[in-house]
């Protein structure tokens, strides 16, 4: 299963440069999501490297134990520079990297970056447009001082304190942690969203942004159902095993050779399922006629569903239920590897090993898909592999100056200029022509017919500019045009310059 990305010239995040100081899972997962889609992620490591390099597992033929599966999975498509940030020269070089980067990500305990002289305030002095992303167990003082701010935290701690473990398992006497490192992965996913949102705002305003995810907070948001249940009904939700407290049938059911999942919410799906089962007690029992009745009688109903499903193999149930009701087999990882869906959607990446192009590592793919762009699947870096590269070209690397807004051209677009008066009367004029003037700032200059404008010139209070295509259809720039139109809407009349020439009126506005 080979991602198509290796043949693409760029990803959708081309042009974003990220300095990644994070280790282990949460931060590296966030930056992996960006690197997979073309962001330039530079992993800053100590001389010992990210501890995930040593965490295993290792392939049997990796006798030197250089390549941990943990590290490979999370750090593909990245570059590595080894620095000691307590060393003056290394710190100075790191600050040069800050000048030319869009984003810094760290998941140290609060206070570590301050002690290194690398707080958000200090870094924003070096680069006034830097986006500073942070993941920690309980957050910094910036958004509210936590009682637990100095506590170290890992996935299991966040799962416990955020309420996830209290909802997981068969009963209150046997609490159960969710298998994958979901607090780390969910926190990393949220941070990647926060980073991209902050980049947009920083490029628009030229101001630095601090974005933070506390793992405790992330798990509370994941357990949102428990919050409203307690507020609405004063209920403290408890583990429900494989069922659901408000829905039935909804959960895990036995098959001859394993288990399957069924999730019935709408009555329409229930009506389909009961006809497939077609036993008298299911077809004719009025206790199951509505969502609320099925929930009230869920134990009895789930028992009946189980008696039916355990008569069939998973494959037989796929044939009976697949595509008809919300249903799926409970897959182990071998079955995931064998699933055609996984292959066709590139959800297992093949990554070349540094020592052999014949052998490939297989890791989980990136679930975020973009039209016209794929995901990269490049080999993760050797510790410090790219330091020489960046040292030698640091002075020639382009800085992260914000890209200018998309500038429509007259061959493809027209511009409508709408003047509004204080009594809410509008004057709409189609610009005869428009052009872009770039000095220290970029200006849009539109010309309109003088006679159409002059009769109303003293009544205007605001003006907006709106670009639209000459020929309808999507050319891939619609989002950029929408952003430009938003930026140029409802400008105060004092924000524009109006120049009267002999034949036309020129209206100029800074973009």
Image (cartoon, grey):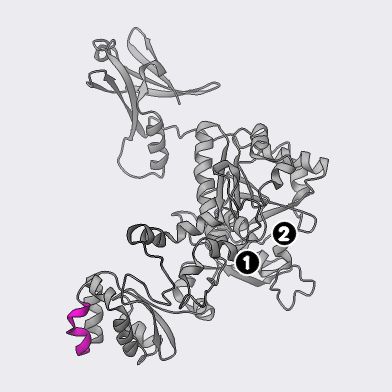
- Would residue 11 be visible to someone looking at this image? no
C-alpha span from label 1 to label 2: 20 Å
Q: How dense is the environment of label 2, judged by Cα within 10 Å: few (below 14), some, or many (20 and up)? A: some
- Direction from residue 369 to residue 46 in the image, left or right: right
Q: Residue at x 54, y 43 (%)?
A: 143
Q: Which residue is mark 1?
A: 351
- Would residue 129 be visible to someone looking at this image? yes
Range of magenta residues: 279-288
Residue 50: numbered disc: 2
Which quarter of the image is occupied by the N terminus? bottom right
Q: Residue at x 64, y 39 (%)?
A: 120
Residue 76: numbered disc: none
- Direction from residue 462 to residue 424 in the image, left or right: left
Check residue 82 for magenta coloring.
no
Which quarter of the image is occupied by the C terminus? top left
Q: Tag 1's secondary structure?
A: strand
On the image, the x and y values in percent for residue 45 come to: 74, 53
Check residue 285 for magenta coloring.
yes
Q: Nearer the viewer, residue 407 or 70?
A: 70
- Picture quarter containing residue 359? bottom right
Q: How dense is the environment of label 1, judged by Cα within 10 Å: few (below 14), some, or many (20 and up)? A: many
Instruction: Give the number of the mark in front: 1 or 2.
Output: 2
On the image, the x and y values in percent for residue 287 come to: 20, 79
Q: Nearer the viewer, residue 279 or 366?
A: 279
- Picture quarter containing residue 266? bottom left
Q: Nearer the viewer, residue 15 or 258?
A: 258
Q: Tag 2's secondary structure?
A: loop
- Direction from residue 296 to residue 399 in the image, left or right: right
- Picture quarter containing residue 237? bottom left
On the image, the x and y values in percent for residue 58 come to: 71, 74
On the image, the x and y values in percent for residue 176 come to: 53, 74
């Amino acid at each position: 299963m080979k991602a198509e990305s290796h043949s693409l010239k760029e990803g959708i995040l081309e042009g974003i440069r990220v300095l990644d100081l994070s280790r282990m899972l949460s931060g590296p997962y966030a930056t992996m999501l960006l690197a997979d889609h073309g962001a330039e992620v530079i992993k800053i490591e100590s001389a010992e490297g990210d501890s995930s390099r040593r965490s295993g597992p290792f392939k049997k033929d990796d006798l030197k134990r250089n390549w941990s599966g943990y590290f490979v999975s999370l750090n593909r498509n990245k570059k590595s520079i080894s620095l000691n940030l307590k060393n003056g020269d290394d710190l100075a070089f790191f600050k040069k990297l800050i000048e030319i980067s869009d984003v810094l990500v760290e998941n140290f305990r609060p206070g570590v970056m301050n002690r290194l002289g690398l707080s958000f305030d200090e870094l924003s002095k070096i680069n006034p447009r830097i986006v500073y992303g942070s993941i920690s167990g309980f957050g910094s003082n910036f958004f509210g001082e936590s009682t637990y701010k100095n506590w170290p935290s890992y996935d299991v701690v966040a799962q416990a304190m955020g309420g996830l473990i209290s909802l997981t398992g068969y009963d209150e006497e046997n609490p159960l942690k969710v298998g994958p490192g979901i607090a780390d992965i969910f926190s990393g996913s949220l941070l990647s969203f926060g980073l991209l949102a902050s980049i947009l705002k920083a490029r628009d305003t030229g101001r630095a942004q601090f974005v933070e995810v506390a793992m405790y907070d992330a798990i509370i948001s994941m357990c949102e159902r428990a919050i409203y249940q307690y507020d609405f009904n004063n209920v403290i939700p408890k583990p429900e095993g494989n069922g659901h407290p408000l829905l039935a049938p909804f959960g895990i059911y036995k098959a001859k050779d394993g288990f399957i999942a069924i999730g019935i919410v709408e009555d329409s799906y229930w009506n389909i399922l009961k006809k497939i089962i077609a036993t008298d007690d299911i077809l004719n029992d009025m206790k199951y006629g509505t969502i609320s009745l099925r929930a009230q009688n869920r134990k009895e109903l789930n028992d009946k569903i189980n008696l039916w499903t355990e008569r069939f193999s998973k494959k037989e149930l796929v044939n009976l239920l697949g595509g008809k009701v919300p249903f799926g087999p409970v897959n182990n990882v071998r079955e995931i590897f064998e699933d055609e869906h996984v292959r066709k959607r590139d959800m297992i990446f093949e990554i070349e090993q540094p020592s052999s192009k014949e052998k490939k590592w297989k890791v989980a793919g990136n679930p975020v898909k973009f039209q016209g762009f794929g995901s990269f699947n490049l080999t993760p870096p050797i510790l410090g592999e790219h330091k020489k590269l960046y040292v030698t070209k640091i002075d020639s690397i382009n800085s992260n100056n914000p890209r200018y807004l998309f500038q429509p051209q007259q061959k493809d677009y027209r511009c409508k200029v709408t003047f509004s008066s204080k009594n809410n009367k509008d004057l709409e004029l189609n610009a005869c022509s428009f052009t872009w003037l770039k000095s220290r700032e970029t200006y849009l200059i539109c010309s309109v017919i003088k006679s159409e404008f002059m009769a109303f010139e003293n009544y205007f209070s605001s003006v907006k500019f709106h670009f639209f295509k000459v020929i309808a259809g999507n050319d891939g720039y619609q989002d950029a045009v929408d952003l430009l139109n938003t930026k140029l809407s409802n400008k105060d009349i004092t924000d524009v310059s109006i120049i009267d020439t002999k034949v036309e009126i020129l209206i100029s506005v800074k973009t």
